[in-house]
Image (cartoon, helix red, strand yellow):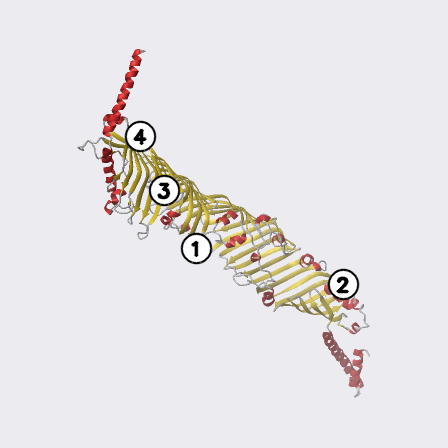
Amino acid sequence: MKPAVKIIGWGLVLLCLGGLALFLLARVLITPERVRQAVVPVVERVFERPVEIGMVDIDLFSGITLDKLVVPAKGGEPLLQVDRVVLRYRFWALLTGQLMIDRVRLEHPVARLQRTAAGAWVFAGLPASAEQDTAVAPQTSPVPAPGGSDRDDGLPFKLLIRAVDVTNGQLDVTDRRLNPRAPYRFVLQNINLRVQNLSLENPFPIAVALELNGGRVELDGLLDPQRRKHDLQLRFTDFDLAPLAPYGKDLLPGIFSRAQLQGTLQFAGNRKDFSLGGELRLQQVYLELDALRNLPIQNAVLVIAPDLNVNRTTGLVTFGPTMISYNGISVRIQGNLDHLDKVPRAELRLSWQDQDMRAILNALPAGLLPQLGQLDPAGKISGSLGLRGPLDDPASLLQAGELTLDAVQVNLGRLRPALSGTLQLVGHGLASRKLQLRIGDETALLQLAVKDVTQKPLQLQSRFSAESFNFDKVFPATSLPDDTAASGDGGAGAVVPVDQRTRPVVSGSDEEPGPIEIPLVADGSVAVGAGVISGLEINNLQMDYHLADNRLQIRRLSADLADGKINSSGEIDLGKKGFAYRTDLQLQNVAVAPLLQVLLPDMAGSLSGRLSLQGTLSGRGVTRASLQRKLQGQGRLSLQDGIADGTRLSRGLVALLGLDQLRKIEMHQADGTFKIVAGKALVKGVIAGRDLRMAPEGSIRFGGRVDLALPTSLAPAVAAKLDRRGLFGRLIKDEQGWTLLPLKVEGTFDDPKVGLDSRRLGRMAEKQLIRKLEKKLQKKNNSSDTTGGGSLPEKLLKDTLRGLLGE
């Protein structure tokens, strides 16, 4: 035990002697004068200014402390001022007789930096001749003290800095590059820096934090000077970009006033070949675009999640799955940009998934698309776009794309149609796939195709097809309840009333619709197996149309209607106020009864037969006044095997003639013509039946006023039942024994008044009198040739008049 105790004892003695020796050596090697001689020349060489250092405090364990290091300027505030500089040295290096500084800490340094009008960054106050020297990056290699072994005083200092700490720093920046007369100024505060294991051969960690206008920026990661590859992460917290707005005025097409930056940006590589990742969030964005001065972007949110690889040597930028979101509307970008050093060329794919239409509209600046606000779009869209080509030719960039619609709906007048399906873009051509239109409970398939979407005007081909489609549910003839909500909440494809401004003009309105400018050339067709229009059941509906120069041509419209056929063609000029229109209409053997049941329900069951019609209509305007002035048309019609049972006209005949038999009138054939002019329809026709014949002729005015002459002939069997005691006892018969009735119809279409036409009756009597007189004269004249006598003509005239007058 005694040798061990001796060894321990001697070790403690040696340790104490070594510590005492180190303490004495430190006192000899580290003196305030030597520290000043080592530090001052280094700082003066950097700033080319005399350096002022306050008190120097030396402690064996805590290091060397310099109070108030100041680099003065010629006038005004100093270039650099540090409240305290702490130098740490290697303890055991003192045994070699050297002072090796390996750690520096700067407490509350304040520096002034400026950017000259030429663009060089220098410490404020330095002469122009020093700008280029101080603009270069500082040395990171070990810096030997000016008092090296070659100096006469043999100062044993060696700077081999391995760690640097900066706490609570401040940097006042003045930028004269933007505006030399009114330089831009800002202050970086609470700067904290920590660098450990500083080396030129191996990566070393770095951490920086600072504040600007209350926002915080942090940078940490690894720097690798030898391989020139760095792995850094930049974090922003409530960082206000407004102080930096002047630096972006040439990059943004407008005036930027506010934005707050949050998030993380990851950097890996060097300045020529690097990658970017992370997520940045710009919120409370206020931007006034040059193109939309009256519609500023306010309180917007922009999120960018980059996944980029940038090679500045080859001029290639590769996009991984990079997400960009504006007010919740997200787009994903993948692909690359090439030839950045020349004319950039893109090969990118943009895609989005389940984006809500209302959210898209709300994301846009208020008032940008007021028409869309009235349309109240809803539903979701997904899709992608393929961009390929040089960026200086935007028209050629779009090469492929796909848009998927999921119950996308808008308000169109009283309708709210919904579309579901896909639109595909290949090259410049657009085509639909499984595109379904839904309005209320009715559905149809749409086929759309555009040969070249870049061509002006667009040339569209379309086809509307359905096995069955009830047009009455889509276009209701009667007004809906006022409390029906005018929004998409009624369901996709609902039929709802909307704002009065969006409703189509009806005939009772005083304002004409149009003109409508449609920059489109369209050809299409409609095919419906079975449908309902205005309550009429139709089958095999076929229509072909052509739209160009705002003119809609219905080249063919045909359908099976009420056991007959309907064919039509026409044209509407949408480019004129009130629209100008023309149509040709043809009906073939259409049953009248179902037509009346739907079109004139109060006359249902009163008329039957098979109707054929051929006519034309033309005009301009849809208001009541326009129709009365400008509607024109003409044509002919016929009714076969018709039966009028209880019509207003037949009831009028029964009331006038007292013949109940005429309540039901059979018409073997009825033919007529019509001509519409000056607000009235001029009609003329012939009706032939078993019991009577008619030859109506006259007019029916636009308001329903009726003024018809209705010459009527009654069959002998029917006329025999007339009450001959009154006026009807003097009616005239034709050569076939039919009794002639000069009737007329006055009043309105809803309430016609049937009566005798006394003036026509008088004319008929005169004609009949002349004919009988001629016959009797001829007969008497023949007999006078045999009997003679001068008083015979006078007697003949008297007898004839007595016979005519019934005396």
Q: Residue furthest bottom?
A: 790
| Residue 153 at x, y percent in the picture | 18, 32
Amino acid under disc 3:
Gln
Task: Examine the image and state in which quarter residue 606 appears.
Answer: bottom right
Name the secondary structure under disc 4: loop
Q: Earlier in the sequence, mark 3 or mark 1?
A: 3
Measure the C-alpha gap from mark 2 to mark 1.
Answer: 76 Å
**Circle 2 residue:** 663
**Counting residues from the N terminus, which is met first, the one under dot 2 or under dot 4?**
4
Q: Amino acid at mark 4?
A: Ser
Please name which of the two marks, 2 or 4, marks the residue nearer to the observer: 4
Discs 3/1, front = 3
Q: Name the residue beneath numbered marker 3.
A: 189
Question: Mark 4 sits on what residue?
Answer: 62
Mark 4 or 1: in front is 4
| Alpha-carbon span between mark 3 and mark 4 | 28 Å
Closer to the eye: label 3 or 4: 4
In this picture, residue 756 sits left or right of residue 266: right
Q: Which residue is mark 1?
A: 293
Task: Choose between 243 and 442: the one closer to the eye.
Answer: 243
**Quadrant of the snapshot with the N terminus:** top left
**Badge 2 amino acid:** Arg
* Mark number, residue 637: none
User: How many numbered circles are shown?
Assistant: 4
Disc 3 element: strand
Is residue 390 visible in the rendered structure shown here? no
Determine the CA span between mark 2 and mark 4: 128 Å
